[in-house]
Image (spheres, rainbow, N blue to C red):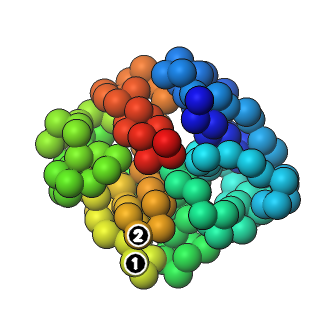
Amino acid sequence: MVRIDVVDNHGQFTHLEHRALRDIGVDTTLLDNTVPPEEIDADGLVLSGGPDMDDTGNCAEYFDLDVPVLGICLGMQVMAESLGGQVGTGEYGGYADVTVEVVDGDDPILGSLAPETRVWASHADEVTELPPGFSLAGRSDVCAIEAMSDRARDLYGVQWHPEVAHTEAGTELFENFRHRCE
């Protein structure tokens, strides 16, 4: 059985990410974001959302573990900033229902989703510049970079929350990520 651990960045939906993985048959554990990288023994990681970019513990060190990583909301922002991209304040702020356009139909995480997918996202902060090696995977009228991928390193990020009921195809997104970890 594939094991995907969820790194807890103290977000309000972290327990739902953990539950969503269990619901699709993944062995999963919630890890505090201060766990040293050498203590992680998983086939993949989900970096959860959270309220504070200054409270992400060791997350920046987890990208060198040579396992697929999915960053959700703050997790995507940590990924971008740690790897040479830019994060800034979003123009639209808080949580909202957003239509994301999947711009890369071959993307391993988003490619199977409908070309336009409704999601639940926060845009208080957002990725404003992709890190080197990443490509744009999704965008919206609210945010130019809703999703990003670095296929060579198996690193993926989404601005939205696939674990909440308001998001279409959230389970499908988690299943696609699970396949990257097998």
Q: Is residue 15 left or right of residue 69?
A: right
> Which residue is identified by label 1?
133
Q: Is residue 167 left or right of residue 79?
A: left
Mark 1 vs mark 2: give the one in front.
2
* Residue drawn at the location 54% of the way across and 21% of the way down: 25
Q: Dot 2: what SS?
A: loop
Q: How many marks?
A: 2
Q: Is residue 74 left or right of residue 131?
A: right
Q: Are marks 1 and 2 in contact (CB under 8 Å)?
A: yes
Q: Position of residue 76 (x, y in %)?
A: 52, 57
Dot 1, how many residues are within 10 Å of its Cα: few (below 14), some (14-19), or many (20+)?
few
Work out whether 85 lies above or below 154: below
* Badge number at residue 108: none
Of residue 99 and residue 152, the one placed in the foreground of this image is 152
Q: Position of residue 73 (x, y in %)?
A: 52, 49
Work out whether 148 lies above or below 16: below
> Which residue is identified by label 2?
152
User: Could one spot residue 154 in this view of the protein?
Assistant: yes
> For the residues marked 1 and 2, what is the alpha-carbon distance in whole angstroms?
8 Å
Of residue 16 and residue 124, the one placed in the foreground of this image is 16
Dot 2, how many residues are within 10 Å of its Cα: few (below 14), some (14-19), or many (20+)?
few
Three-letter amino acid code at disc 1?
A: Gly
